Image (cartoon, rainbow, N blue to C red):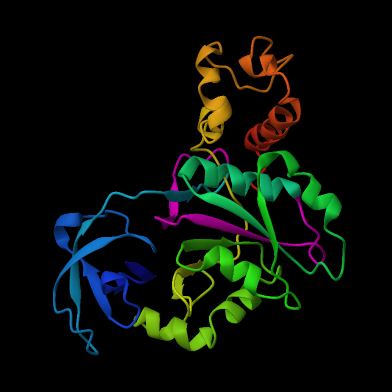
Amino acid sequence: MVVSVDRGRWGCVLDGDADRRIVAMRARELGRTPIVVGDRVDVVGDLSGRPDTLARIVRVADRRTVLRRTADDTDPFERIVVGNAEQLFIVVALADPPPRTGFVERAMVAAYAGGLQPILCLTKHDLAADSEFAAAFDDLDLIIVHGGIEDPLDPVLDLLTDRLTALIGHSGVGKSTLVNRLVPDADRAVGEVSGVGKGKHTSTQSVALPLPDGGWVIDTPGVRSFGLAHITPDDVIAAFTDLAEAIEDCPRGCTHLGPPADPECVLDEFTGKEHRVAAIRRLLVALASNDPW
């Protein structure tokens, strides 16, 4: 598994063993094939992991899930952030900086479209109550956990252990503090996992860190924007199995937002699920908002 990327070198662990680390280069025949943290790769060559040795990545396995973003909603170029993560931990502070439902909704859209399970992690709830903010997601089956510096870690670890989880969040929300609590001596761990360059986790790179009791967290840089140009409304609805088949009967080009834009949207025919449909439509509004935050 790829655990770090730095200037044309990829830090990898063999067979999921955090103690078996190598540094690899991309084989020439792969050309410019993107290789990101979380990718499963085949390697050949020197697999000893000794200093100044290099293996070669000769194959990138198909990704089971993928977290993508674009610079903004008009950018046609997709950037793969993380491969094969099972979960997306969306870290949001309840104050300083104040939370924005739009960011969470757009992150959820990216997770659903990429096959990841979104989880909302709230920090700094000692500064502001979370009930009103959390209530915005009541009908989306979103798991919500507290991960502030004063909160117990066990509920967070219960969700992360033995899983591959990507963490995202704006700068200043407490994501790095949470990582340091989850991975004791995380600064040293970053250097050991990387084995590349100076072994530093810079603001522009993601890095996978092993959890003490199994599993990995992928710490991603503080996000400035989260463009979704690559995602369609159908991609979002497909994540909700109770509604996904129904939209096959929607008119071509339906955005599933309902009247007046889509007066024949099949989602309006669901009875007993009006609140859920409304919540999902808020995700679609976030997708259509052209607001990368």
**Residue visible at 63% across and 22% down?**
256
Horizontal side of residue 94 vs 196, given as left or right:
right
Q: Residue furthest left?
A: 45
Residue 227, relative to residue 87: is it above or below?
above
Horizontal side of residue 123 vs 85, given as left or right:
right
Horizontal side of residue 30 vs 290, given as left or right:
left
Q: Position of residue 229 (x, y in %)?
A: 53, 38
The residue nearer to you, when weighing 126 against 28, is 126
Res 205 seen here: no
Residue 198, relative to residue 7: is it above or below?
below
Residue 78, relative to residue 212: is it above or below?
above
**Residue visible at 52% across and 83% down?**
186
Q: Is residue 110 magenta?
A: no
Q: Position of residue 205 (x, y in %)?
A: 47, 69
Marks counted in the figure total 0
**Residue visible at 60% across and 22% down?**
255
Which quadrant holds the N terminus?
A: bottom left
The answer to which image quadrant residue 6 occupies is bottom left
User: What segment is highlighted magenta in the picture?
Assistant: 73-100
Residue 53, relative to residue 87: is it above or below?
below
Q: Position of residue 167 (x, y in %)?
A: 56, 63
The residue nearer to you, when weighing 123 against 293, is 123
Q: Is residue 89 magenta?
A: yes
The residue nearer to you, when weighing 196 against 126, is 126
Q: Position of residue 60 (x, y in %)?
A: 25, 56
Horizontal side of residue 136 vs 129, given as left or right:
left
Res 278 seen here: yes
**Residue visible at 40% across and 56% down?**
83
